[in-house]
Image: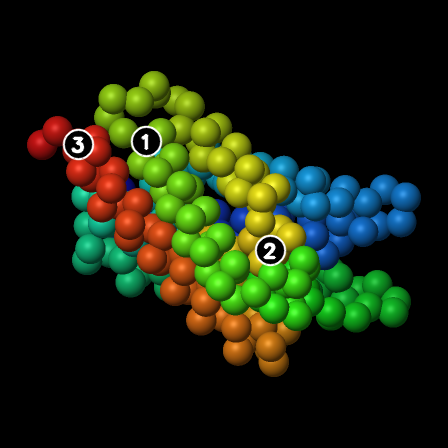
Amino acid sequence: MKLTNKLAAEFLGTLWLVFGGCGSAVLAAAYPDLGIGFIGVSIAFGLTVLSMAYAVGHISGGHFNPAVTIGLWMGGRFPGKHILAYVIAQIFGAIAGAGILYVIASGKEGFELGGFAANGYGEHSPGQYSLVAALVAEVVLTFFFLIVILGATHSNAAKGFGGLAIGLALTLIHLISIPITNTSVNPARSTSQALFVGDWAWNQLWLFWAAPIVGAILAGLVYRWMAPEKK
C-alpha cells in the first residue's frame, strides 16, 4: 500500500473521529428533551473509531491519533520514518472535521461557540479538576488505550476483533474522563477544537499533547517487554 493511500486513510479516519465524537457533544449532547448526554458522547467516540477501524484500518493501521502512532512505534509495530507524515495527516483530518462541525453548528440561529468540545483543566474542566488530576488521567488513560491497541492487534490475538476492543476501550475512557478533561487521549482531536476556541483552549493545549504522548510511550515500552512480537 502506498504511503499516500495510508495518509488519506488517516486523514479520513481522524476527520470522522472529530466530526462524529465532537459533533455528538456540540450538536446532540444537550439538545432539549432528546439530549444524549455524556454517555451518548462516550459511545459516539467509540463508534467513530470502531467504524473506521474496519473501514480503513486495513489501509493505514487505523491510528487516527498521534499518540497511537508514537505508541505503536515505541512498541515496535510502526516505522519511525512515517511518524511525521501520519501525525500531519491526522492533524489536518481533525481540523477538517472541526471545520465541518463549525459550519453546521453555526448554521443555527443564536449559535455561540462556547467550549466547542475543547479539552481543559482547572476552571475549564467540566468537573473543575486540577491540572495535576488532568495530567494523571490523560497519561493513565492513554497508557491503557495503547495497551488495548497493542494487545488487540498482536499476532497472537484473536483475528477480526481488534476494532471492537479498541472502540469499546475508547468508549470506556470517555465514560471515565469526560468530567475531568472532556477527554483527549488524542493530540490531534485537542488541537482541532483549540484552533477554533483559541484563548484558554490554546493555552492549555500543551497538556493534551504531552500527557497522551507520555502515556503512549510508556505503554509501548511495557507491551514490547511483556509480549514481544516474533521476528
Mark 1 vs mark 3, CA separation in Å: 11 Å
Mark 3 vs mark 2, CA separation in Å: 35 Å
Q: Residue 229's mark? A: 3
How many numbered marks have been drawn onto this rendered protein structure?
A: 3
Dividing the picture into quadrants, the one containing residue 1 is top left
Dividing the picture into quadrants, the one containing residue 98 is bottom right
Dividing the picture into quadrants, the one containing residue 175 is top right
From the image, tell me which residue sits under label 2: 180
Q: Residue 151's mark? A: 1
Crowd rating for badge 2 (residues with CA inside 10 Å; few <14, some 14–19, many 20+): many
On screen, residue 50 above or below 60: above
Q: Position of residue 222 (x, y in %)?
A: 24, 42
Front-most of residues 26 and 106: 26
Q: Position of residue 202 (x, y in %)?
A: 54, 76
Crowd rating for badge 3 (residues with CA inside 10 Å; few <14, some 14–19, many 20+): some
Q: Nearer the viewer, mark 3 or mark 2?
A: 2
